[in-house]
Amino acid sequence: MLSFKSIITKNKKRFRMFKSHELTANKPRQALGRYMYTNLQFIYKTRVIHQWINGLKLSIQKGDAGLVGNIYYGLYEFRESLFLLHFLRSEDCFLDVGANMGHFSILTSGSIRNRSICVEPLKSTFNRLKEQVSLNKLDTLVQAHNFGVSSEAGNLFLSNDQGVMNKIVDECHPHASAIDVKTIDQLVNTTTITAVKIDVEGYELQALKGAVKTLNNAALKVIIIELNGSGKYYNIDDDEISNFLVERGFSPFRYMPFTRCLNPVEKYDKNQFNTIFIRDVDFINQRIATAPRIKVLHHDI
């Protein structure tokens, strides 16, 4: 159990984070209150049902790094999340590769009523994803698949002891599960995809190499991809992934949700983990300009 001094130190650190975050900067004490109350609840409860935005719910357990930020900040990974809420329409299909527990798919399908296709290879995490889908009654909109993606179909090994940081490893890894993998093109087949999010802990280039037909389809306008140096584990540089997408007509941007502006960046966004790659900027700007406003905490964005 943490000492009183350790608790105070952690709370001070969190408070500084809340003061610097765009969604909580003007009300950091309220955010700290949510943080403290949530962690008090986890002392007595195994899970908390959080009333999220647009009437959605999240079933959250202690250690759910991919979900609990939605309690503290109102909306986790808020730039990418709000971009998708402003861009997607009900007729679109969103592909969520490395869905974890379903943050993006639950958010978009639950808010916009678009179709989402999720891929989550680790069985225990996949079960939590299905739990979120059922909790929000989105079974007809969110299609979840329990396998991984790569440049070709087959079998690989995935670490199972690193939470949201689980990644493809070799079979000698002490904490690994065997998983089936398919290509994105096999998964998508004839479905028209409008936007893709890829978060596979450094395995992004292999995932993209299995998506040749999908990338060549002009209907695909957006790729949100994590580029944070984790590809070095596989001897892949982030510049290589950026170049791969730029060669296929995509350009890297950072979204400013409060002004609904897309700011170009060089190669990829080095100030955060995810970069938004887009093509057909005029089409995207028209959509985000006409999307309804989203209520997040005390903000109307």
Image (spheres, rainbow, N blue to C red):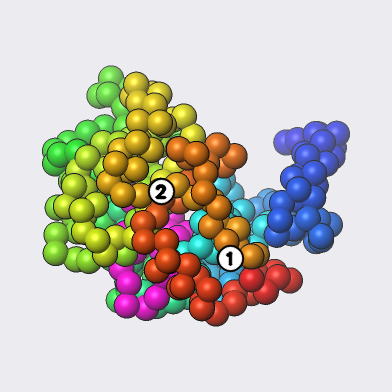
At label 2, the amino acid type is Ser
Does the CB distance between marks 1 and 2 fall below 8 Å?
no
In the depicted view, which residue is nearer to us: 235 or 155? 235
User: Measuring 85% from the left and 34% from the top, which residue is drawn there?
Assistant: 5
Estimate how packed mark 2 is, as few (under 14), some (14 to 19) or many (20 or more) residues with alpha carbons within 10 Å: many
Vertical relation: 191 (above or below) 77:
below
| Left or right for 50, reference 118 | right
Residue 48 locus on image (x, y percent): 59, 62
In the depicted view, which residue is nearer to us: 105 or 301? 301
- The quarter of the picture where the C terminus appears is bottom right
Q: Is residue 250 magenta?
A: no
Vertical relation: 34 (above or below) 254:
below
The residue beneath circle 2 is: 251
- The quarter of the picture where the N terminus appears is top right
User: Measuring 21% from the left and 59% from the top, which residue is drawn there?
Assistant: 217
Residue 284 locus on image (x, y percent): 43, 66
Q: Secondary structure at mark 1?
A: loop
User: Measuring 36% from the left and 56% from the top, which residue is drawn there?
Assistant: 279
Cα distance between the residues tagged 1 and 2: 17 Å
In the depicted view, which residue is nearer to us: 69 or 202? 202
| Left or right for 5, reference 163 | right
User: How many marks are shown on the rendered structure?
Assistant: 2
Residue 198 locus on image (x, y percent): 37, 48
The residue beneath circle 1 is: 260
The residue segment tinted magenta is: 87-110
User: Measuring 37% from the left and 78% from the top, which residue is drawn there?
Assistant: 90
Instruction: Identify the residue at the far front of this view.
Output: 282
At label 1, the amino acid type is Arg
